[in-house]
Amino acid sequence: MAGRTLTVSIDAMGGDAGPGVVVAGLARSVIRHPNVRFLLHGDEAELKPLFAKRAKLLEKVEIHHAVERVRMEDKPSQALRRGRNTSMWRAIESVAKGEAEVVISCGNTGALMAMSMFQLRTLKGIDRPAIAALWPSMHGQTVVLDVGANVESDAKQLVDFAVMGQAFARAVLGLERPSVGILNVGEEELKGHESVRAAAQILRSVSLPIEFKGFVEGDDISEGTVDVVVTDGFTGNIALKTAEGAARVVINFLRAGLRRSLLGRIGALFAAGALIAMRRKLDPRASNGGIFLGLNGVVVKSHGGTDALGFASALDMAIDMAEADVLPKIVADHARIAEQATPESETAVAGTGAGAA
Amino acid sequence: MAGRTLTVSIDAMGGDAGPGVVVAGLARSVIRHPNVRFLLHGDEAELKPLFAKRAKLLEKVEIHHAVERVRMEDKPSQALRRGRNTSMWRAIESVAKGEAEVVISCGNTGALMAMSMFQLRTLKGIDRPAIAALWPSMHGQTVVLDVGANVESDAKQLVDFAVMGQAFARAVLGLERPSVGILNVGEEELKGHESVRAAAQILRSVSLPIEFKGFVEGDDISEGTVDVVVTDGFTGNIALKTAEGAARVVINFLRAGLRRSLLGRIGALFAAGALIAMRRKLDPRASNGGIFLGLNGVVVKSHGGTDALGFASALDMAIDMAEADVLPKIVADHARIAEQATPESETAVAGTGAGAA
């Protein structure tokens, strides 16, 4: 990959903290990626002063003036109709026009998805995009998708998510043959929705560069039982947020417990290094950003409330994705499934699609 | 409630650890509940020796001999067909016959649900039972249901879960007017499945002794934003297990971090009290047991892998439920909804029921 120049398109105006965080994150990431150029979309008057003391950084950056911005409270449909002059629209447009390989924004997720679908369209054969997240596990990181793009998914869509998730795991986690599981309420073949059972049947019958492990349960995500966990966006979104909440409550109980006694406060001093290491491992910044998969272009959504470190780490992931050429791999694997799918599994898909509507 | 004698029926042969744990748990619980009698169903030859040094406990306990037992790997349908002589069947039968107010088992969940539905039947007006769990939160405990009885739930069933959950929260958490939320992927009215939106519409339109807060998200469970979180059994089961896994990973990271350095190990010594307090708060034993709600009888499922302390705490909850007379309250609140439901919301329910099939 060395030597190849990549271009990353950035919506500089999204997020709660404004463009200051974006530019500070950019300054961190550029050191690690000397071959990457950046197109920065946003309000010139706000952006230019941020480079006053960063003349060297500006050599890698092209500022593209955009008058408007999408606000966090805007509805996706409104943003889509009236947002052609926003930094978010323009940032996606750079990818649609082939000027950049990947776009990143820490703005409104719904608007970003709506604009991305409109401008980039889904990949050949893929009905619906998915949002993938990286989850800290006992053994490293687990890819989970969909975590919120779709409220319901039929068997065909779940199979597509498996294809997209394994391509992502190979690109970002560097795995040769990722293991994949479908999230369910038990490991037995007969459990769960019609759609998860039909999807498992298809994945068992086709040959892909993955190890398909059948069904996994909620605790397998943190356990790291498989590299990729496939689920519908309703379940995935709720599971992700529930887990974040549970982790937060554990840390709060611990903090409160340590503060309560003198011994605890002394212990906390000695254990500070360990506590910081733990926080770093769990830090959402370290696995910051959801990735929109299944579109003709890579779209990375960074957390709205992130800081410079978090934005830099989302940028790193975006660059990994662009370097790994994930999209053609998804299309090829998807075509492979379409060819291999047996008549039975095709029927199962059709049947489920109708039933789950 | 003092003075009233309650009878608890126990399946002594379920669980991974066998009847020893059950009897040891019983010995703990009986001290706190002098007015409770216990019917212990199981193999007399195994049970009797466990009371050799517990003559006083035996005064409160009636051993009912049952030759067979349901194994953890038995399928619910098999257990139902061939299990009439098992300790689990007999334990439920005691409630069905009115000999006991509540039944508790740490055996096979699927078999316990199938046998309970067959023998106890659902409450008037309730289509499907739900399994409720108590979840540790920042402010105490949150009731979550359904966590696994049903794979799909329509709007009417979600409303029933809200009615059952609030009655449970009043009984076990002692709340006068519990707050209730429906689990969704966002708080806006337009988000989520048809079924959660229709259920919210009904709960907004009826008058119940609850504070209905609309939609809540995954992290609200641990946050304790509401007292009762309503969801379908697929989502609830996955969310619960995902959260347990996330909490475990945090604790493991912390433990590993503390072990890694000498300072960490010294810190852990000083902080031991705080760490133990945290573990106690998060201990699944302290909120051990799922409760089957919606049947003509209270059924408590204790964890299969629990110890004596865990079984005692599940027993405590079973006794709380029995003392609070939850079932007639559920029936009354349910009837109230049926009377109040507006024609629009009735239509919404009917429409969703068909659509979600």
Image (cartoon, coloured by chain):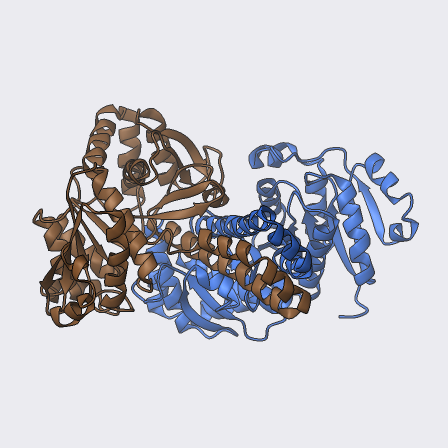
Chain colours: A brown, B blue
Residue A198 sits above or below residue A317 on the image: above
The answer to whether residue B217 shows anywhere in this view is yes
Numbered disc total: 0
- For the N terminus of chain A, give its image quadrant: top left
Q: Position of residue A124 (x, y in %)?
A: 15, 38
Who's the residue at 27% across and 24% down the image?
A: A342
Question: Which percent across, then down, holds residue A155?
Answer: 31, 38
Q: Going 72% across and 42% down the picture, which residue do you hit?
A: B90
Q: Position of residue A249 (x, y in %)?
A: 53, 61
Q: Which residue occupies the foreground of this view, A23 or B280?
A: A23
Percent x, y of residue A150: 29, 51
Left or right relative to A221: residue B267: right
Compared to residue B255, the image places residue A349 above or below, namely: above
Closer to us: B177 or A267? A267
User: Image quarter for residue B82?
Assistant: top right
Judge by depth and name the residue closer to the eye, A238 or A39.
Answer: A39
Q: Nearer the viewer, residue B317 or B90?
A: B317
Residue A25, located in which quarter of the rendered image? bottom left
Q: Picture quarter containing residue B12?
A: top right
Q: Please indicate whether residue A50 sits to the left or right of residue B48 in the image.
A: left
Identify the residue at image location x=64%, y=64%: A266
User: Does residue A350 appear left or right of residue B226 in this picture?
Assistant: left
In the image, is residue A119 above or below residue A185? below
Res A231 visible: no
In the displayed structure, does residue B249 sit left or right of residue B108? Answer: left
